[in-house]
Image: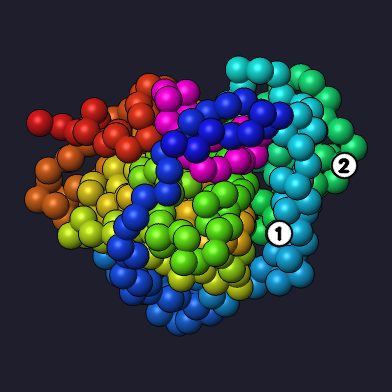
Amino acid sequence: MVVLAKGELEEIALPAVQKAAASPVADVPEIDLGWEDAAAAVVAACEGNGFFKVTGHGVAPELLARVEAAAAAFFAMTPPEKEAAAGVPPGSPFGYGSKRIGSNGDLGWVEYLLLAVTAAGETAPLSAGGEASPSPAFCLFRDLLNEYVVAVRSMACNLLGLIAEGLGLREKDALVRLVSHEESDSMLRVNHYPPHPELKLPLQLQGHGNLTGFGEHTDPQIISVLRSNDTSGLEISLRDGSWASVPPDRNSFFVNVGDLLQVLTNGRFRSVRHRVMVSSPRPRVSVIFFAGPPPQERLVPLPWLVAEDGGHRRYREFTWREYKASADRTKLAENRLCHFETE
Ligand code: GA4
């Protein structure tokens, strides 16, 4: 067991680094958004492992580099400084967190910032979800993240438009409208995976171990758009249930199919199970935009896809508020969709 040093946020025992065989490298489809046949390529990737890489996205590399540097500076502060900077009352799911994931006892070798995205007009102001006022330095970081959210949310909408096109939906904005709505419930998560103390030891003393940074799970939302620095760690579960590692690429974005897209496509796409393993001696920083619908949105498989499936509707209707409340009662690794399946 590794017990964190006194003076850290609190003492939480984590399992020691496990000896584990490295996962094979995933064959991740790469899609350039400028391609003429991007819609078909996105649908094929979603039907495959539900995970793909986006290039030709048009987001300025300079913005990505600024966000990466600002995130590193934020996590370089002491835990009390980070908590105070994020300015969120205790008990809120938003703001700064360390090692605890969700509220049902999941732990990971990760610290994070979780922010609500409230989509008002053209901009996407981030709110830490509380009344307490954040520090001026944190406000600057938040302004930068707002800029990032505008870019990445527009990419998410682009992708949802391509999916609708590739699926041959008559209603072209059936998916986009869920995320571009004024009350859409999207989130931004900035994760920092410090190298495990044992991984700082000379290689011959380490035993090539692995530690869970963020345990396996599927994302509950529609799609998630992730960007990381050049440190490895992300792994996806392939259709056969085996794990494969995703080589990092700081110039590209990675997209996950979420649970809601699985429902909307009546199971034609499947939400991808993924996890982060900490095995690098360098820190990993990732920023993930989770594209969600308004809380009151009623979700049901799209009629066209139900018809294509011989009229079999695989999920019952529910609201996003209902799904989130149900998800919040689960442990990270649980299957959350099974509660919404029809007979
Ligand atoms: C996984 C995806 C996002 O990080 C997140 C996570 C959320 C949390 O950290 O509070 C959850 C997890 C995520 C799924 C099930 C519940 C809720 C932790 C947890 C055990 C912010 C989200 O929306 O769902």
Residue 68 numbered tag:
1
Tell whether 338 sits left or right of 218: left
Which amino acid lies under the numbered mark 1 shown in the image of this protein?
A: Glu
Q: CA distance from mark 2 to mark 1?
A: 15 Å
Q: Position of residue 34 (x, y in %)?
A: 53, 79
> Which residue lies at the image location 32% right of the left edge and 38% below the top edge?
333
Q: Position of residue 49 (x, y in %)?
A: 29, 62
Tell me the crowding category of disc 2: few under 14, some 14 to 19, or many 20 or more residues within 10 angstroms, Cα based.
few
Q: Nearer the viewer, residue 306 or 87?
A: 87
Tell whether 191 sits left or right of 143: left
Most common secondary structure along the magenta stretch: strand
Q: Nearer the viewer, residue 9 or 216?
A: 9
Region rendered in magenta: 96-116
Relative to 195, say whether 299 is above or below. Answer: above
Relative to 120, say whether 268 is above or below. Answer: below
Q: Can I make out residue 284 in this image?
A: no
Which image quadrant: the C terminus?
top left
Which amino acid lies under the numbered mark 2 shown in the image of this protein?
A: Ala
> Which residue lies at the image location 61% right of the left edge and 21% below the top edge?
92
State the residue position of label 2: 137
> Which residue lies at the image location 72% right of the left edge and 70% below the top edge?
60
